[in-house]
Every structure is written in structure tokens, then in C-alpha cells.
Amino acid sequence: ADADAAAAALLDADAAAAAEADAAVVVDEEVLVDPTVTEEEELPVAAAGTADGEATTEETPAPVIVEEVLTEDSVRTSDEDFAVSVADGSVTPEATTTATTETTAEADDNDREGLSNLEKALLIGLGAVVVGSILRNGDRVVSNTGDRVVVEGKDGYTVYKDDDALIGQAGSTVRTETFSDGSTRTFTTRTDGTVIETIRDARGRVLRRARILPDGTQVQLFDDLKPSVAVDVVELDRVRPAPQFYTVTGANRDELRALVQEDPTYLPDRFFSLRQIREIEQVRELVPGIDLDSLTFASGSAAITGEQLRSVVRLGLLMEEILAENPREVFLIEGHTDAVGSDPSNLALSDRRAETVALALTENFAIPPENLVIQGYGERFLKVETATSEQANRRATVRRITPLLQQIAAN
């Protein structure tokens, strides 16, 4: 009932907030979409909530609060695949084996067990509507895997998921506050007393994350609540060096460390929001991308087998060292697919692959999951240009994005 109430709060979010447009800049008579938080935008209510969940003003209703303790059954591991097939009305990701299509109601009933509050809310607010339904902001649900919902809007496809799913560990207590505008604030308290605070907007996008140690020390990882300067993509394309891509197997340990820690060769005296890094290719590519070239996913799968885990050992050990030296480091894990299958299903699959790699890193190394950000890009960035099934395109890429993040400017 509490989860349903939280979901209802999301559904009752202000329509204007749900339809919030991305900021844009006009350069050379070309409109360039730039996901930017500006001073003019209204901040989510979650950003102003108090630690005990009380409303900050008499006009602001108190949030709906849900608390749960995570168990082994309620957290995902890197060797697990989708529990529900992608139901987008066409083919399964990368045209793999035919799966039984579940009705929306059946998927809703079967998948509620073990899902986080935001995932339950997504199922109720987005995923539990008929695939193809038009949402009130004009977006259309085109795919639902239970833990990921792909929506088609004016700017293309967007995948919605719970960014905190990676953070949840067995034994942790998760307290989620859902506010009147649909924004949420989550406190994940681990068994050692460490607390991870996350603020999301009404669409589930993570805006701020911080680690609070048992002694009260706070480590801010990123903060998209601060105003961001719009990105002039055309100018950035003109002046930046060519993108750099490397492979784990193509470098020895010292070379790999130098690549991972390499600062941008061009940085226009500014920092970027996490959303800009995730969504603007030209910004991401200011730092090197390291392909896990020895890690290959089976067609249509997002799981890593025990044999494939060897592929992440070198990078995992290196990331351990870097994070021990600087606990504020943030890494972006990118997931990719080949070009077989539909765009929506491949987007969901690639996002799950990114999560799988992040889970493998946190399960096997001393890498705090809150220092990892995941993002799937579907088939947009093929390594091998082909429309056929291609193993090299079913991959993951890692970038150290700390030098780009706004948090550096504040610390």
C-alpha cells in the first residue's frame, strides 16, 4: 500500500513538471538540445525537504514515506538476466529467442516482488499502462521490462529506471520520500552505518548523490541541482581534439592507469552537469573511453557469466586503487548493443548491460556502487558499422568523468 501511495504521488505530479522541456541553445541557426538545469527552472521539492521528511513550508504537503530492508532476493546480481521479456510489440533485444509475451497486469503482478519503490512506481505510473499508450505529456510507452520503461517523445527514446538499484545491497535499509511534485529523496543506510542520499526529479532522473559516513563526514559525488551553463555543441565540436578510445587489453597496467586518469585535453574553463555528460556525446568524449573489449555479451543477454568476469579484473583492481586515493571519483559505465532488434528494446538492453558491468565491479572489488553511473546507448554508437549481428558491438565502455563534473568546482 505504501508503494502504491508513492506511485500515486508520482502520477499526481504537476503536469507542467512532467512536460518540462529541455533547455536549448541556437547556434548557426541550428537548434541544439542541451539538457541543462538553469536558474529559471523550478527545483524539485525533494531538494528542499528536511532530513526527517517534514515539509519545509505550510503550503508544501509532507512527503509520502516508504521504508524497506533489502534482502538477497530483492537485489540484482551481475549473473542475472531480465526477469521479464521486452514487450515492445516487435522483436526481443537483438532478435534473440522468442519469449512469452505477458499481459501488462501479469507483468505487474509477477514483478512487484523484489523491486525498489521507484521501480514499483514506474510499473504503476508508466509500465503498467498498455504498451503504446500516450502519456499526458505526449510521450508514448514503447517498451517495458519491469525494471526499465522506454518512452518515445519528441526528442527520441528515453529509458527510465531506478538509478539507486545499483546502490542497494542486502541488509541495507532504504527510506524513500516522495514529494508532491513527484520528486523523491532516498536514504540508503548500510549495515556499517554509511548513508547514501539521492535526490531525483519527477521523472526519476538522479540529480544529487552524496555519501555520508558514520562520523558525519559527507562526500558529495555530483550535484545537478546547481545551475548549469548550456553547451555550445557546434563550438565544442570545432575546437576539441578527436575522441580517444582505448581497450583494456591494448594497454599494460601503467598505461591503463594513465589512460583512466587522463584529464581532458580540452576543457573550456567550465564543468558540466551529470545529465549533460550522460546525454551529450561531445561532452562525454572530452575524457577517454576504455572499452572492455574482452567482455562480450551473448546476443540479447545482459548477464555476465563467471568465465567472463576475468575480463574486468584489471580494470577493477585499478579502479579500487583510484577510489582509495580519492573517494570522490565518479565513473560512467556505458552499455551498447549491435544493430539487430528494435531501437527501444536495444536501449533497455544496453542500459541493463551497463548495470551488469557496474554490479560485477562492486561485487568483486572494493568499489562503492554510488561512485558508478550507468547509461545505455542502444545501437547508437556501433564499433563495427553493420546492421547484422556483431559481437564487437555488444560491449561496455568505462570513462572516468570526475574532471568534467560540477562537484569538482565546489570541493
Image (spheres, grey):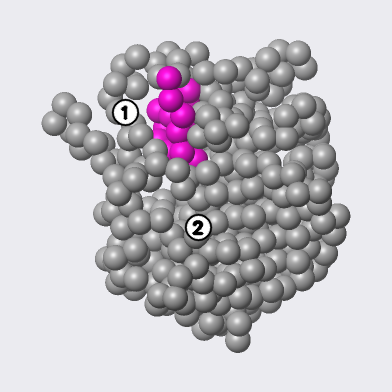
Q: Residue at x 60, y 55 (%)?
A: 198
The residue wearing badge 1 is: 233
Kindly tell me whether residue 3 is visible in this rendering: yes
What is the magenta range?
269-286
Residue extending farthest to the front is 58
Q: Residue at x 53, y 23 (%)?
A: 287
Residue situated in front as seen by the camera: 175 or 376: 175
Give the residue type that dot 2 points to: Ala
- The relative height of residue 138 versus residue 250 in the rendered view (above or below) is below
Kindly tell me whether residue 299 is visible in this rendering: no
Q: Residues within 10 Å of mark 1 (few under 14, many from 20)?
A: some
Residue situated in front as seen by the camera: 72 or 51: 51
Residue situated in front as seen by the camera: 40 or 35: 40
Q: Is residue 276 magenta-colored?
A: yes
Q: Quadrant of residue 381?
A: top left
**Which SS class for mark 2?**
helix
Residue extending farthest to the left is 29
On residue 47, the disc is 2
Residue situated in front as seen by the camera: 340 or 405: 405
Q: Position of residue 276 (x, y in %)?
A: 42, 38
Residue extending farthest to the right is 192
Q: Position of residue 384 (x, y in %)?
A: 49, 29
Give the residue type that dot 1 points to: Val
